[in-house]
Image: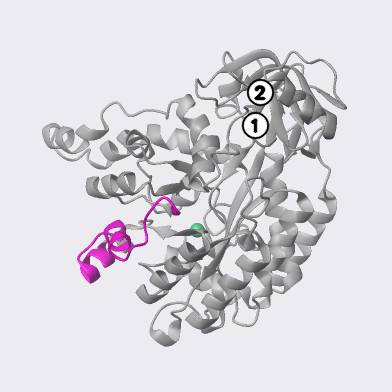
């Protein structure tokens, strides 16, 4: 348990508004001892947690959390907000990666700044209502004359009050260079570099309680190649000069793996290492096809992973998350965009991640069933006994590991004195959760719950299950309007 001395509490409470979250049935602290406290209160002053647990009984605002579960706000490490404009497009449901990237490129011609804002607001609202308080977004499909799209999603996150890690994406290799990407969604490297610097200068706040941390993210460094080696190196260099992070897709498809080995003699991870694009300031989406050596490289370089199990279920595969965690790699979860997953619900995604780890041995064996048992056992030996990811590890993936992937583990991801007040509270008094033995775990095994109360940076964003920073009905009707337009 971490406590601040009493004089710190007094100095906090004298200067800033205090909030007491009182008498929660469970507080999942994610502190060093991973304590789950029962019948506990915690005290907040301004945007920071002052004591957890606390004996204090009075505060400027009291949130009665009796019968509730209190979690650190969850962290989403990979998304493409604009894709929310493409929920359940029938021809994209079973299209391979290259095909849907193409469809997306064609259909996105009609986007304007309001559509981009609408898709961002919908994604952010769904994330928050599922208990997510910090999210990344990989904003990459930017027509050459629409650099303002990035600013629209920063505005949406600000309006909704969500801690935001927007990634200024880029694609420089278009169909003119023989790739599958329509030229209108690609930009010159000069413009990419200029724009990354502009959005860092305009939006990046490096302070510890920052609500906006900008990163940069060339889209596909390996396959389907959208970003040249030169682009990767230049963007990485610019990130390091500015002290911001780099994010990209890697090792998502077996075709990508084979293509990279053929082209460079290296695995996708080996290639990124060889061009200096791994490190503790880098997090990579997907990472399904990693060799044993790749896992060692990511662990040794402290490179983090954003695992996106729902999106990966659309034909890509299952990431070996259990092994990555055992190797010491920080693994966060990513709901990903609607090209791979039509929901932005962080609880569903964590549940999916845990469930699929349990399916791996069985999936492999089902495909090996025509082999003789000896061959089958030899091939499947490494997965013997794989099961659901342990719930304690899942809590870490959703909170501390996600925070680490975004470089924020010192300020978010746990409920401890000194940390920022990013908190998600759930009311599990529901038929779907009735009788659960271990109530905190039921959040990821029973149905997802709508968050009852969400606080971000000490401010209330959801109260009694309702969004307080924006009108939910307006967000829905705006999204509908955008979708009608994109459908044409
Ligand atoms: Zn993605």
- Which one is in front, 290 or 40? 40
Q: Is residue 148 left or right of residue 185?
A: right
Q: Compared to 469, does 351 lie above or below?
A: above
Residue 488 visible in image: no
Whole-percent x and y of residue 328? 35, 37
Whole-percent x and y of residue 141? 57, 71
The C terminus sits in image quarter:
bottom right
Asked if the stretch drawn in magenta spans residue 283, the answer is: yes
CB-based contact (under 8 Å), mark 1 and mark 2: yes
Q: Compared to 402, does 198 lie above or below?
A: below
As drawn, the label of residue 418 is 1
- Which one is in front, 259 or 453? 453
Residue drawn 63% across and 60% down? 204
According to the picture, the residue beneath numbered tag 2 turns out to be 4
Whole-percent x and y of residue 334? 52, 47
Residue 187 visible in image: yes
Asked if the stretch drawn in magenta spans residue 375, the answer is: no
Q: Which residues are magenta?
A: 258-284
Residue at the extreme front of the image, as rendered: 7
């Amino acid at each position: 348990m971490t406590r601040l001395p009493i004089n710190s509490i007094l100095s906090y409470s004298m200067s800033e508004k205090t909030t007491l979250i009182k008498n929660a049935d469970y507080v999942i602290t994610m502190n060093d001892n991973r304590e789950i406290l029962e019948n506990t209160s915690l005290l907040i002053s301004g945007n920071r947690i002052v004591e957890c647990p606390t004996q204090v009984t009075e505060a400027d605002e009291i949130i009665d959390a009796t019968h509730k579960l209190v979690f650190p706000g969850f962290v989403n490490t990979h998304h493409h907000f604009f894709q929310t404009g493409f929920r359940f497009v029938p021809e994209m449901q079973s299209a391979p990666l290259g095909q849907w990237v193409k469809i997306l490129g064609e259909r996105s011609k009609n986007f304007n700044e309001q559509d981009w804002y609408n898709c961002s607001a919908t994604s952010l609202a769904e994330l928050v209502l599922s208990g997510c308080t910090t999210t990344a977004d990989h904003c990459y499909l930017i027509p050459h004359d629409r650099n303002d799209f990035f600013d629209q999603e920063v505005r949406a996150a600000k309006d909704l009050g969500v801690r935001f890690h927007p990634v200024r994406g880029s694609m420089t290799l278009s169909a003119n260079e023989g790739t599958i990407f329509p030229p209108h969604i690609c930009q010159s490297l000069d413009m990419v570099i200029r724009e990354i610097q502009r959005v860092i200068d305009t939006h990046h706040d490096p302070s510890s309680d920052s609500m906006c941390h900008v990163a940069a993210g060339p889209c596909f460094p390996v396959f389907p190649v959208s970003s040249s080696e030169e682009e990767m190196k230049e963007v990485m260099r610019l990130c390091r000069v500015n002290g911001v992070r780099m994010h990209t897709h890697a090792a998502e498809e077996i075709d990508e793996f084979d293509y990279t080995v053929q082209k460079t003699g290296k695995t996708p991870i080996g290639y990124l290492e060889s061009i200096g694009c791994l490190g503790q300031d880098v997090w990579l989406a997907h990472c399904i096809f990693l060799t044993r050596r790749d896992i060692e490289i990511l662990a040794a370089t402290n490179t983090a992973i954003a695992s996106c199990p729902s999106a990966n279920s659309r034909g890509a595969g299952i990431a070996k998350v259990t092994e990555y965690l055992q190797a010491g790699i920080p693994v966060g979860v990513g709901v990903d965009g609607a090209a791979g997953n039509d929901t932005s619900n962080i609880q569903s995604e964590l549940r999916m991640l845990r469930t699929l780890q349990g399916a791996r041995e069985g999936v492999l064996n089902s495909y090996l069933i025509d082999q003789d048992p000896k061959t089958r056992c030899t091939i499947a030996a490494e997965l013997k006994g794989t099961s659901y990811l342990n719930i304690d590890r899942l809590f870490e993936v959703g909170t501390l590991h996600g925070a680490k992937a975004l470089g924020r583990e010192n300020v978010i991801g746990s409920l401890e004195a000194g940390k920022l007040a990013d908190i998600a509270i759930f009311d599990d008094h529901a038929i779907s959760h009735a009788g659960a033995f271990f109530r905190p775990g039921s959040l990821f095994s029973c149905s997802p719950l709508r968050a009852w109360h969400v606080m971000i940076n000490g401010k209330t964003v959801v109260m009694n299950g309702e969004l307080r920073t924006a009108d939910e009905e307006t967000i829905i009707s705006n999204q509908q309007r955008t979708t009608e337009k994109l459908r044409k």
